[in-house]
Image (cartoon, rainbow, N blue to C red):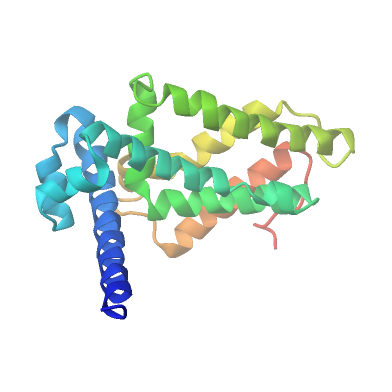
Amino acid sequence: MTNDKPEETGHKAGIRRENVTKILAAAETVFAEKGFNGASVGLIAERAGVPKPNVYYYFGAKEDLYRRVIEGVCSIWLHAADTFDETEDPAQALTTYVSSKMELARSRPHGSRLWAIEMASGAPFLQEYLVGTVKPWLESRERVLERWIREGKLAPVKARYLFYMIWAATQHYADFAAQIDVMNEGRPLDDSQFVEAKETVIDLVLKSVGLRESRMAA
């Protein structure tokens, strides 16, 4: 009996992790497609391939699941800028951050669109998260850029507006994918086009802060 219990606990924990992962992935897509009001727990459960009661069991109310999904998306974005604390090279920090944000726009487009919908609606579910998590994060990144400016590593720039520009440029590739497809002869960008787009955004950001290194010219 002593040996069976840990195995059973481990097995149940594995099932829980698998179900939670499936539900979060399904919810990200459904909320992005339908919005909060249009999405149903039943549809999320169906897409995840789990019984509807499981969604409530793991996450509680639909509102709790929605917050968990959208805050999870943003958390990944925030961690994309960890290199600001790991390097004293602004070109490397900015390049890594922009590159990561572009890749996330491509790999998690529904998450980006869901965030855009929430913001366009006035962030009714995320006011506390924006104030308590995103704003302090942004201020911490601003302090790093401002220090680099004082040290002469960057051209003077209002750091907050630089971040706004980066967010707009990178998330555009998820939020406005339909427009991009139409402008690209009705097709999504292929791998080489996406690399070119990513390098263009990186190049423009670096040049905007006086870092003339151009990945496009490399």
- Left or right position of 40 against 139: left
Residue drawn at x 15%, y 53% is: 47
Please tell me how many numbered marks the rendered image carries: 0
Answer with the quarter of the image where residue 175 lies: top left
Residue drawn at x 31%, y 51% is: 185
Q: Residue furthest right?
A: 151
Residue drawn at x 10%, y 48% is: 52
- Left or right position of 146 against 190: right
> Which is nearer the eye, 72 or 61?
61
Answer with the quarter of the image where residue 146 lies: top right
Question: Where residue 163 appears, x then y in whole percent?
Answer: 61, 33
- Left or right position of 26 against 74: left
The answer to whether 140 is drawn above or below residue 69 in the figure is: above
Question: Where residue 48 appears, x then y in whole percent?
Answer: 18, 55
Q: Split into 4 quadrants, where in the image is the N terminus? A: bottom left
Q: Residue furthest front?
A: 1
> Which is nearer the eye, 217 or 46?
46
Answer with the quarter of the image where residue 217 lies: bottom right
- Left or right position of 15 against 212: left
Question: Where residue 114 appears, x then y in whole percent?
Answer: 33, 37
* Observer able to see residue 186: no
Q: Split into 4 quadrants, where in the image is the C terminus? A: bottom right
* Observer able to see residue 197: yes
The answer to whether 34 is drawn above or below residue 181 in the figure is: above
> Which is nearer the eye, 46 or 58?
58
Question: Where residue 76 appears, x then y in whole percent?
Answer: 49, 48
Residue drawn at x 38%, y 32% is: 116
